[in-house]
Amino acid sequence: MVCQSLLNELCRTINGAQGALLLDAGGEVVAGSDACDERLRLIGAYQGIALATAHRTSERYAGGMIERLVVRHASGTVVACPLKDGYYLIIALAPDASVALAEYRATQMRERLDAEL
């Protein structure tokens, strides 16, 4: 699958990436990197809820488009990016990973994933 190879490529280009997922609007996994596990799938579903909430809030207060959501926690960081048609990208990072690089790579990958959807 093309999307899975793109997610694997994304993980290879970010030191400390623990996995990446492509999810649909309902939080169901469409594709995952090779390092994807049940924990990451659960994180991905919850981040979808957070993205949807942020999107609704942004629309309500005319805050503009949400480009990404970054959540830091004790075990690392999660970068979530909305894609077209309600799909979204999740990247899980180790605590020592470069969040800025992950955000940059996610922005690049967004265009490629949107083209595949």
Image (cartoon, helix red, strand yellow):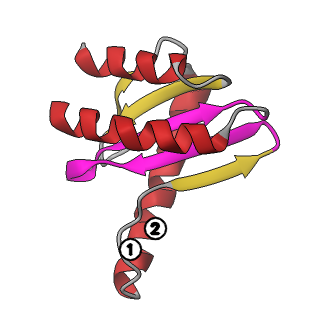
Q: Is residue 56 above or below residue 88?
A: below
Disc 2 on helix, strand or loop?
Answer: helix
Point out the image quarter for the N terminus: top left
* Label placed on residue 2: none
The front one of 35 and 9 is 9
How many numbered tags mark residues here?
A: 2
- Is 75 placed left or right of 71 in the picture? right
Coordinates of residue 6 in the picture (x, y in percent) = 34, 21
Give the image quarter of residue 24.
top left
Magenta span of residues = 74-95
Q: Residue at x 65, y 52 (%)?
A: 71
Q: Residues within 10 Å of mark 1 (few under 14, many from 20)?
A: some
Give the image quarter of residue 29.
top left
Residue 94 in magenta?
Answer: yes
Q: Residue at x 52, y 49 (%)?
A: 47
Q: Amino acid at mark 2?
A: Thr
Q: Are marks 2 and 1 in contact (CB under 8 Å)?
A: yes
Q: Which residue is mark 2?
A: 53
Point out the image quarter for the C terminus: top left
- Is 2 placed left or right of 68 in the picture? left
Coordinates of residue 110 in the picture (x, y in percent) = 33, 41
**Which residue of the protein is positioned furthest toward the right in this rendering?**
74
Q: Is residue 18 above or below residue 91?
A: above
Give the image quarter of residue 18.
top right
Q: Which residue is mark 1?
A: 56
Q: Residue at x 44, y 78 (%)?
A: 57
Q: Is residue 2 visible?
A: yes
**Which residue of the protein is positioned furthest toward the bottom in this rendering?**
61
